[in-house]
Amino acid sequence: MLPVRPEVLRLRPYVPGKPIREVQREYGLTDVVKLASNENPLGPPPKAVEAIRKALSGLHIYPEGSSPELRGRVAERLGFPADWVMVGNGSDELLRLLAASYVQAGDHCVVPGESFPNYRAVSELFGARVTEVPLRAGAMDLEAMAAAASVAPTRIIWLCRPNNPTGGVFAAEAFERFMAAVPSTAMVVVDEAYHEFDETGFDALAVLKRYPNLVVTRTFSKAYGLAALRVGYGIARPEVWQPCYTVREPFTVGGLGQVAALAALDDEEHLAATRKLAREGKRFLEELCVDLGLRYLPSQANFVMIDLGRPAQPVFEALLRRGVIVRPCTGFGRPEFIRVTTGRPEELMRFASALKEAVQSGG
Ligand SMILES: *Cc1c(COP(=O)(O)O)cnc(C)c1O
């Protein structure tokens, strides 16, 4: 056998939300609702779809590698120079490029427990030793994370706000104290994939200019409804991105993705409707939990994590049989929880009646 790198052998493969087609095949169903991957229930922004149509005749031409137009527009909107923004093939690519550029074998990285699994995966891929710090009340315990980072020289500290899968957030003051406490040699990455849903007014960009070691990432996959096109971006000093440009493949962000993301930024109506729907969906799910006597975690994102008070796997399967896909949280170390994305009202009604049947009939 050809020798695979030990770092690769140790990686746990990412388990995505169960695809609609798979459930249709396995259960012989046609009408399946997916509330498992925090996708936009309204679909893509109409302006982005229109922009893609117009761009189709240019499919034979390579896109511009660094997405200069999109970079410029994002930077302008956020009040930064264009070279502070890097666009990636989803924000996932940026997380990996940061690890590839900065993590050496044996380096120490700090990740939150019960969070997005990629922080650990990309760190370990490049040989990092990873310390995982448990959440406190569903959000990152920044004091404990700063303490973990001070035990050994630390290369990257990964944060997620609002946190996936809990939806929890740390306080702005706690973040300020954390940034002041962390040594400037440790990079702090704040993954804000759900920033657009956050109603606390928090903005990690507010302190970005004061901390050269701070990186913020965001995405067009969630609130902007373009998950299939794979476009994300990061904001940091140009020096931070320089090595990432050297490491990256030349054309990772497709031309249609660049054009669609630009148009999505202009589709304010779609974004406003998306936020409103998420707010209402959360209220619906919270009331449902109260009705059923289930505990849930307060969320600033477009999903709610629900404590079923019993093993979630049989309930997850009972929901699948009724054509509703949610996300079991076993992979996050919470075998009694499910994570439910806020859907359209009719999708949430389907979920509500399926859940009632599932918990009342015991399957
Ligand atoms: C969905 C998600 C991402 C990935 O976004 P892409 O831009 O689609 O790669 C990153 N971080 C978190 C926490 C997510 O939930």
Image: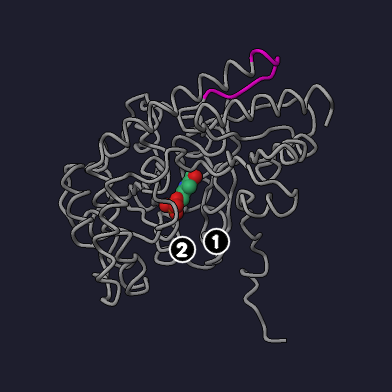
Q: Please tell me how many numbered marks the rendered image carries.
A: 2
Amino acid type, label 1 = Ala
Name the spot of residue 280 as percent of width and height, x first.
46, 22
Considering the numbered disc 1 on the image, is that residue within a helix, a strand or a loop?
A: loop
Between disc 1 and disc 2, whose residue precedes? 2
Name the spot of residue 102 as percent of width and height, x first.
41, 63
Measuring 66% from the left and 13% from the top, which residue is drawn there?
291
**What are the residue bounds of the magenta stretch?**
290-298
Measuring 27% from the left and 66% from the top, which residue is drawn there?
242
Measuring 40% from the left and 41% from the top, which residue is drawn there?
192
Name the spot of residue 80 as percent of width and height, x first.
17, 47
| Above or below 68: residue 17 | above
Mark number, residue 174: none
For residue 68, say whether it is visible: yes
| Above or below 94: residue 355 | above
Left or right for 11, reference 200: right
Residue 283 vs residue 91, the one in the foreground: 283
Residue 242 vs residue 326, the one in the foreground: 326
Considering the numbered disc 2 on the image, is that residue within a helix, a strand or a loop?
A: loop
Mark number, residue 103: 2
For residue 157, say whether it is visible: no
- Would you identify the image quadrant in which residue 99 lies? bottom left
Disc 2 crowd rating (10 Å Cα; few below 14, some 14-19, many 20+) is: many
Residue 337 vs residue 332, the one in the foreground: 337
- Would you identify the image quadrant in which residue 360 lies? top right
Measuring 76% from the left and 34% from the top, which residue is drawn there?
315
Query: Which residue in the protein does label 1 denote?
Result: 128
Quadrant, the C terminus: top right
Left or right for 126, reference 269: right
Cβ atoms at labels 1 and 2 below 8 Å apart: yes
Q: Does the magenta stretch include residue 104?
A: no
Amino acid type, label 2 = Val
